[in-house]
Amino acid sequence: MTKKQQLVPSDGMLTRHRSSYEVTDDIVVEILSRLPVKSLKRFRCVCKSWCDLISDSFFVMKHANHATKATSSLKILVSIEPFQSIDYEALLKHEDEDGHVASSQPKLDLSKCCPDMLRSCHLYIVGSCNGLICLHGVDCYWGYSDILLWNPCTGDTKVLPEHTLFRAHYGKYYRHPMFYGFGYDSSTDDYKVILGDSYVREGDDDDGIEYCHTKVALFTLKTGSWRNYYEERRVNHNKKKSFIRLVGQGCLSNGALHWIELDDSRSRIISFDLAREKFQEIVSLSSLVDKEFLDRMPSHETFVGIGSTIESSLLVYFYVPNHTSDTTLTIWVMNEYGVKASWTKLVHISLKINLSRPGLFGIHDSLFPVRILENVEVLMSCNEHELVLYNPKEKTYKTVLVANLSCEGVMYAETLVSPVIDGGVTSNQRGGEAEASKTTPIDCFETSCLNINKPILGITKKPWKLRMEPRGPTN
């Protein structure tokens, strides 16, 4: 390397002598936006310009867009105690000699960065988006609930203000919401948390009239506050088409959260559009669900769930235990969003035929899919104590992790996105009670549900000038 082209360190930073090989600012930005978070943390010390760039909100989102598409930055968070992170790329490529999957499983200790209140209650996974994970901590006995936003890669956390909707309608004790979700609204460059509940109360007279109740608490990160909505609808028990009955974690895809509604009369996917803040039916599942499955739905062992692929295509899965014949797990993928005819059966697992290891899989065992990998292998929790990776083509499995597992797992990317912005409550202060939220009536299905007027706060690209000037004289 000639002296003209040599990189010369000067007072803690690197400068290049002028030459025809100088790198433009745009190229530097493109290179940095593709680097792992660990490297970017170090590069903040190169110079003030780089520190400002790496902290810039547009750069953070640009980096997140690359990270969510790169398998090298993807991790799977498993909700065991303590939380553990599994390397996604290792699941795809590597294997130990004893047949175990060689995946890094660092333990993620939340107790060092969370308030004492969160350390003593169970944490549910609400959702994951752009490297942020939303957790719901509940202690029904003492009557409190906390929502936590957490970036496992950077360690940044934020405890949201307390929401009062689920306490207000049940008195002193807290009722856990039946459905919940977390996602990103690109139209306002904002993150939103939704907690909801639906229940039916019979009328006083024997006239077939019932009262359908729906309540939703919606949090937006930029405002740092909750909005509560409540509705009581008087309907005939045979005409509850507009009444939503959702359960569990919403799946984020195409800018909306999705749940499956399944009962003895219908099966469909319900979405909550994060930009319009509106519930709507996406597609019916009647062609995928047979009568035998619906007849068995009252059993606590039978379940249906929803998820997404790496490409954000929607998945639904049906688990049907059978103590006298085959127990099955069937997974379908929607190749074209919202098109009923695009459903394709992706995986069908018959436990008695395909999985025969004594003591692990049997007719009394339970499976819960955690994630579908891009090579169509299925990461599953077995009997809530073992995590296995199943290959449907070869009908084989590999052990990933043995522990006292719960059935929750979520994919996340290693990003710089921070939950700590203006508004809300930081991880270092509880912030007291949330502001009283006005209870607003809603029309909860296929109308202007939660249609709140607000300004558009989209991202605006900023021109960067990376000043690589030395802090002192150079030779």
Image: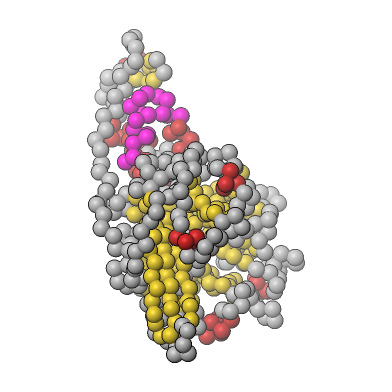
Q: Quadrant of residue 303?
A: bottom right
Residue sitting nearer the eye, 21 or 157? 157
Does the image show residue 151? Answer: no
| Left or right relative to 27: residue 73 | right
Which residue does the image show at 53% across and 82% down from the upper left?
Answer: 294
Which residue does the image show at 65% across and 72% down from the upper left?
Answer: 351
Q: Is residue 440 above or below residue 74?
A: below
Where does the magenta region start and end? 42-58
x and y, in percent, of residue 216 in the image? 41, 63
Residue sitting nearer the eye, 254 or 8? 254
Residue at the right extreme?
358
Q: Is residue 128 above or below residue 343?
A: above
x and y, in percent, of residue 347 in the image? 53, 69
Which residue does the image show at 30% across and 19% down from the upper left?
Answer: 469
x and y, in percent, of residue 419 in the image? 42, 44
Q: Quadrant of the C terminus?
A: top left
Does the image show residue 438? Answer: yes
Residue sitting nearer the eye, 315 or 302? 302
**Main SS type for the magenta part?**
helix
Q: Quadrant of the N terminus?
A: top left
Indicate yes or no whether the magenta region holds residue 295: no
Q: Quadrant of residue 474?
A: top left
Which residue does the image show at 31% across and 35% down from the upper left?
Answer: 27
Residue sitting nearer the eye, 372 or 453? 453
Q: Is residue 332 above or below residue 54?
A: below
| Left or right relative to 197: residue 277 | left
Q: Is residue 394 above or below residue 350?
A: above
Colour pattern? secondary structure
